[in-house]
Amino acid sequence: MTAPYRNDHDEQVAETSIGDIIGNISNDLSQLFRQEVALAKAEIQQEATKAGKAAGMLGGAAFAGYLSVVLLSFALVFALGSVMPDGWAALIVAAIWAAIGAVLFVNGRKKIKTVDPVPRRTAETLKEDAQWLKNPTG
């Protein structure tokens, strides 16, 4: 007479070998590692995008600074060479470029301070995984 509550699943579990269990654990760890690597890649890509935008703003600030120096130099030449409206016009344009450069620099500096090169979420999940491996039942 067979047990009334026995099913095929119980027989399959009882027939599972140690090798199968170790193989399953190995597959699970392999999949976990691949997921952690994918998470790290995503985090690093996100931080690289932020760094790229901040670098673009700093590049814009450098270009604006360069134009300011060139235009200020022309303005000084015109102003000293002769008192003409062209020199003052160049001075006004250079001042505008200097203001634009200052705004770009301040914004770029703020952005670059927010860049975090360490994938924090991945580091946290790796710590959790290591803790789990030390004590998988608790």
Image: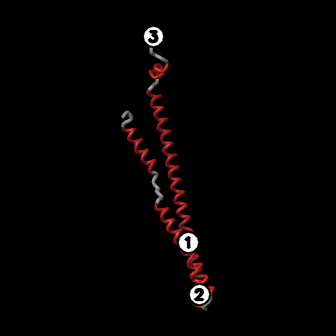
Q: Nearer the viewer, residue 126 or 54?
A: 54
Q: Residue at x 59, y 87 (%)?
A: 77
Q: Residue 4, how many percent across, how many down?
A: 45, 12
Question: Gap between marks 1 and 2, in whole Å?
Answer: 23 Å
Which residue is identified by label 1?
100
Instruction: Name the residue type under label 3.
Output: Thr
Which residue is identified by label 3?
2
Q: Residue at x 44, y 15 (%)?
A: 5
User: Is 135 located above or below residue 96 in the figure?
Assistant: above
Where disc 1 sits, the SS reads: helix
User: Is 58 located above or below residue 124 in the figure?
Assistant: below
Q: Nearer the viewer, residue 122 or 91?
A: 91
Q: Nearer the viewer, residue 113 or 48?
A: 113
Q: Residues within 10 Å of mark 2 (few under 14, many from 20)?
A: few
Instruction: Name the residue type under label 1.
Output: Ile
Question: Gap between marks 2 and 3, in whole Å?
Answer: 107 Å
Check if mark 1's residue and mark 3's residue have beta carbons within 8 Å: no
Q: Nearer the viewer, residue 87 or 46?
A: 87
Q: Residue 31, how many percent across, how many down?
A: 50, 39
Of mark 2 and mark 3, the one earlier in the sequence is 3
User: Is 24 located above or below residue 118 in the figure?
Assistant: above
Which residue is identified by label 2?
77
